[in-house]
Image (cartoon, rainbow, N blue to C red):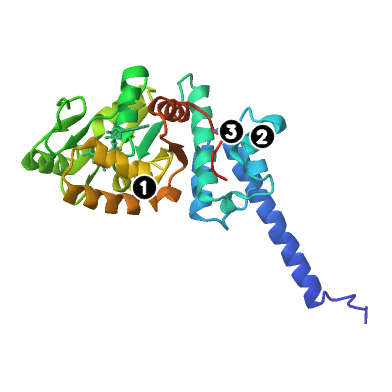
Amino acid sequence: MAELGNRPTPPDVDRVAASRAAIAARRARAAVKATIASGDVSSLTVLDRSSEEPEGIEGRLRVTEFLLSVPAIGTTKMHEALERLAISPAKRLGGLGKHQRVRLREYLVDREAANHGRRPNRLVVLAGPTAVGKGSVAGYIRENYPDVLLSVSATTRSPRPGEVDGVNYFFVDDAEFDRMIGAGELLEWATVHNASRYGTPRRPIEQALEAGRSVLLEIDLQGARSVRAAMPEARLIFLLPPTWEELVRRLIGRGTEDSAEQQRRLETAKVELAAQDEFDYRVVNSDVADAAREVVDLMKIRTAPSRS
Ligand SMILES: Nc1nc2c(ncn2[C@@H]2O[C@H](COP(=O)(O)OP(=O)(O)O)[C@@H](O)[C@H]2O)c(=O)[nH]1
Ligand SMILES: Nc1ncnc2c1ncn2[C@@H]1O[C@H](COP(=O)(O)OP(=O)(O)O)[C@@H](O)[C@H]1O
């Protein structure tokens, strides 16, 4: 009887199965790259899918092969981009850190905008502890950088001396604020310092971004978190005081709260300072003009991260 020949033993079977799986995975990744290159699936979609399924086909793409799949990105541009984005060429999409993913997404969004002749625009959030100088820095930007659009919030708190309705805030009563919430007119809102409510009118932001303008929101930590959840590509900047003592001096020096409220705000400031790691960038407000320039620089397209 003819020798049946060497029947494959289990290890051979495993090896064959493994090589078939590897070939299938390679073909799948090639298909993903081909759809990006053809424009059938946007690179942003692939990036988002890799976050949802880190071990899926998209998640297993190396960042290098992913970028090389994007039209007009060759080897040189790919390496330059990874250098600027502080992402190792060995990384797979599914293994990117949160901030790396945000930066890579920003990079792709900006390329997309540039390829369509649009100025890359940016939603930037400036937050930080009370009395750190957010209002001063935002006001300086309003006066000196007219091409930056500052969002004007609605608030139920009463105006301080010198504050102008429609410039510093839209000063509204509780009924109107409730109406705005109910009508979905606010991108986010929060009760701040356990007292008044503040909220960002949605429509002016959408119109500005559609028109290709960058927008600056000066809002509290809760608002920053809401924006991050709703618009992951937004840039979050944390404004820091040079020292805690200087922060206390500024709050007391401003003289806009009584001592009980000052104490309450300083307690809130401690909680807010502890959350600075959630932000993409930090700016120290030692000098208002310098801090304003740093914030405006971050609104332009600079993907050199100040964080690892
Ligand atoms: N979430 C949110 N916070 C806001 C908004 N507008 C202002 N804030 C914040 O509300 C807080 C109170 O602001 P303000 O009453 O001007 O006094 P401050 O605390 O001394 O800055 C600050 O942290 C602001 O950043 C907004 O539209 N949404
Ligand atoms: N760089 C700075 N150096 C010194 N004082 C500052 C600086 N920035 C802001 N201030 C002062 O600190 C106080 C709080 O500033 P403000 O803009 O109201 O802070 P925030 O809006 O963050 O509550 C104000 O009296 C302001 O004039």
Give x and y (percent) for residue 98. Answer: 50, 49
Q: Quadrant of the N terminus?
A: bottom right
Q: Earlier in the sequence, mark 3 or mark 1?
A: 3
Distance from Cα at disc 3 to Cα at disc 2: 18 Å
Dividing the picture into quarters, in which one does residue 34 lie?
top right
Horizontal relation, residue 174 to residue 104: left or right: left
What SS does tag 2 mark?
helix
| Nearer-N-terminus badge (3/2) | 3
Estimate the x, y position of residue 205 in percent, counting from the top left.
30, 30
Please give left or right for residue 163 compared with residue 244 in the image: left
As drawn, the label of residue 229 is 1
Between marks 3 and 2 in the image, the one whose residue lies nearer the viewer: 2
The answer, for residue 124, to whether it is visible in the render is: yes
Q: Which picture quadrant has residue 87? A: top right
Residue hosting label 2:
78
Q: Residues within 10 Å of mark 1 (few under 14, many from 20)?
A: few
* Secondary element at tag 1: helix
Disc nearer the start of the sequence (1/2): 2
Q: Amino acid at mark 2?
A: Met
| Numbered circle sitting on residue 38 | 3
Residue depicted at x 53% and y 34% = 108
- Is residue 129 visible in the rendered structure shown here? no
Placement of 23 over or under 146, stated as above or below: below
Residue 118, percent across and down?
45, 21
Give 76 or 52, whichever is nearer the viewer: 76
Query: Which numbered dot is residue 132?
Result: none
Q: Amino acid at mark 1?
A: Ala
Crowd class of label 2 (few under 14; some 14 to 19; many from 20; radius 10 Å): some
Percent position of residue 203, x then y:
24, 30
> Distance between the Cα atoms at labels 3 and 1?
30 Å
- Horizontal side of residue 109 vs 228, given as left or right: right
